[in-house]
Amino acid sequence: MAVKPDHPLEVAVIPGSTRPGRRSDRVARWVVDQIGDREDVAVELVDIADFDLPLLDEARPAISGDYEHAHTRAWAERIGSFDAFVFVTPEYNHSVPGALKNAIDFLYAEWTDKAAGFVSYGIDAAGARAVEHLRLILAEVQVAGVRSHVALSLHDDFEDFSTPAPRPHQCEKLTTLVDQVVAWGSALRTVRSVPVS
């Protein structure tokens, strides 16, 4: 049973692909629709495509927090406002889309000590290999990935390989995933509130 936070956990659902004809934005909207009525989360779709991030162009490492460019500062402000994330990723060549990796690499402190859940999709492994890579990437910026994972099959959980139509057990998995994100995200919110001496 998930522990309800004192006030709703601010959760960003982030579609990981920016390519034309992508499905990740549609899957992300499905996630938002499924969890939008929960009282323990305030959910919002945050689309990387809306930020026009170039290939990483900051001269200083993200861990410095010294962001030179306006696009980085806008991205940092947006990501920094959330307690937790649900990443929606396809699998490109056994890994995550380059746009998602690039967007993560721009920031550091804005990701740190927050929780994340994963919704993936694909043909052969339903995006599972991308999520395995994403867990490692996020661990380096100190994001805690929850165990539960929704892996959607393009054959069985989409209409015409295009429109998300997840089977009932996938909706149940999503509920479990969000329960875990709420529990971990609430705990990590207390970590972030402790002043560093």
Image: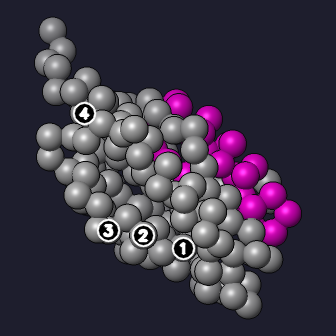
Residue type (three-letter) at the residue carrying disc 1: Val
Residues drawn in magenta: 115-140
Residue 104 x %, y %: 47, 48
* Label 3: which secondary element: loop
Vertical placement of residue 38 versus 117, above or below: below
- Cα–Cα span, label 1 and label 3: 14 Å
Residue type highlighted by circle 4: Arg
Q: Position of residue 40 (x, y in %)?
A: 25, 52
Q: Is residue 185 above or below residue 191?
A: below
Residue at x 22% of width, y 27% of height: 190
Q: Which residue is mark 1?
A: 27
From the viewer's side, name the closer residue of 6 and 189: 6
Labels 2 and 3 touching (C-beta < 8 A) = yes
Residue corresponding to mark 4: 189
State which tag comes first along the sequence, 4 or 2.
2
**Dividing the picture into quarters, in which one does residue 71 lie?**
bottom left
Quarter residue 61 falls in: top left
Q: Determine the residue positioned at 81% across, 58% down.
A: 125
Secondary structure beneath label 4: helix
Q: Amino acid at mark 3?
A: Gly
Query: Residue 37, can we see it?
Result: yes
Q: Nearer the viewer, mark 1 or mark 3?
A: 3
> Marks 2 and 4: in contact by CB < 8 Å?
no
Residue denoted by label 2: 34
